[in-house]
């Protein structure tokens, strides 16, 4: 399907605008990858493939503000455990597999496919082999916000803490549209590494994302 030119008819259009406008039986025309026309379905000019969206909702894509798409590989491995015990099991599995960036990208692709199926078109993701995530996102066409991981122990991707800052710089240098720094958390990243990550984000105009106060145990320490 050439989705640069597309006509959608008979949709329930949920605009998500400031006035919460909902348009029944709407037609939407996309030309050259941009919205070109919106109005009553019966008046819609046709461009490219025509989709009958009867019984379906058309709306802006959902935004997932925090994901670990690659961990889709380990779903069901460990359930119903506190975070600390869950992490120890998952990290062991990750360490056994994710030294290979190709396996990591396969997990990212699986997680991205599940997001798209659920209506998500933008995601902020934190995971090992950061460049694999950007590659998976480009392949799928999803809007991806990612960046350099900071982790003071031996990483599940085979990199140590001394490599993290330069890897993060390289991702900014690659020119990704939504790039930042992603220290894992205050219990896995030392204060000086957190400060270095923040300084880089400010220097490059990127975002800063970390885990914080995830559990009662963390809040009590």
Image (cartoon, grey):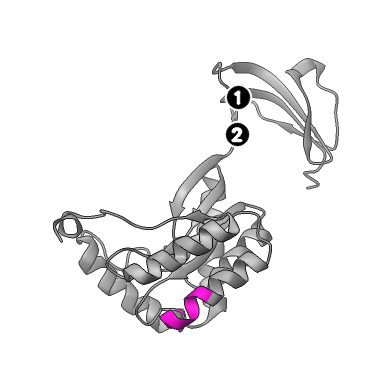
**Image-quadrant location for residue 151:** bottom left
Mark 2 in CB contact with mark 1 (< 8 angstroms): yes
Of the numbered discs 2 and 1, the one sitting upstream in the chain is 1
Other residues around mark 2 within 10 Å, as few (<14) / some (14–19) / many (≥20): some
Position of 79 relative to 10 (above/below): below
Q: CA distance from mark 2 to mark 1?
A: 7 Å
Q: Is residue 74 among the parts visible in the rendering?
A: no
Residue at 61 percent of width and 64 percent of height: 134
Q: Is residue 129 left or right of residue 41?
A: left
**Image-quadrant location for residue 75:** bottom left
- Where disc 1 sits, the SS reads loop
User: Measured from the top left, where is residue 212 in percent x and y?
Assistant: 30, 55
User: Measured from the top left, where is residue 74 in percent x and y?
Assistant: 38, 68
Of 133 and 43, nearer the camera is: 133
Q: Which residues are magenta?
A: 157-165
Of 127 and 27, nearer the camera is: 127
What is the number of the mark on residue 15? 1
Residue at 21 percent of width and 58 percent of height: 80
Q: Which residue is mark 2?
A: 60
**Image-quadrant location for residue 61:** top right
User: Measured from the top left, where is residue 170 in percent x and y?
Assistant: 61, 72
User: Measured from the top left, where is residue 98 in percent x and y?
Assistant: 46, 79
């Amino acid at each position: 399907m050439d989705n640069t030119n597309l006509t959608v008819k008979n949709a329930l259009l949920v605009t998500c605008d400031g006035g919460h406008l909902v348009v029944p039986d709407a037609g939407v025309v996309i030309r050259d990858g941009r919205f070109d026309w919106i109005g009553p379905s019966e008046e819609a000019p046709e461009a490219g493939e025509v989709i009958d969206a009867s019984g379906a909702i058309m709306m802006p894509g959902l935004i997932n503000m925090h994901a670990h798409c690659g961990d889709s590989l380990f779903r069901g491995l460990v359930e119903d455990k506190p975070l600390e015990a869950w992490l120890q099991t998952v990290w062991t599995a990750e360490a056994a597999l994710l030294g290979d960036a190709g396996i990591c990208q396969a997990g990212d692709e699986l997680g991205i496919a599940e997001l798209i199926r659920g209506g998500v078109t933008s995601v902020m993701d934190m995971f090992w082999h950061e460049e694999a995530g950007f590659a998976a996102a480009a392949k799928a066409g999803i809007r991806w916000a990612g960046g350099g991981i900071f982790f003071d122990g031996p990483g599940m991707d085979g990199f140590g803490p001394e490599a993290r800052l330069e890897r993060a710089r390289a991702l900014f240098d690659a020119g990704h549209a939504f790039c930042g720094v992603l220290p894992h958390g205050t219990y896995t990243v030392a204060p000086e590494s957190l400060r270095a990550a923040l300084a880089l984000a400010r220097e490059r105009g990127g975002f800063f994302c970390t885990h914080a106060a995830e559990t009662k145990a963390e809040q009590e320490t």
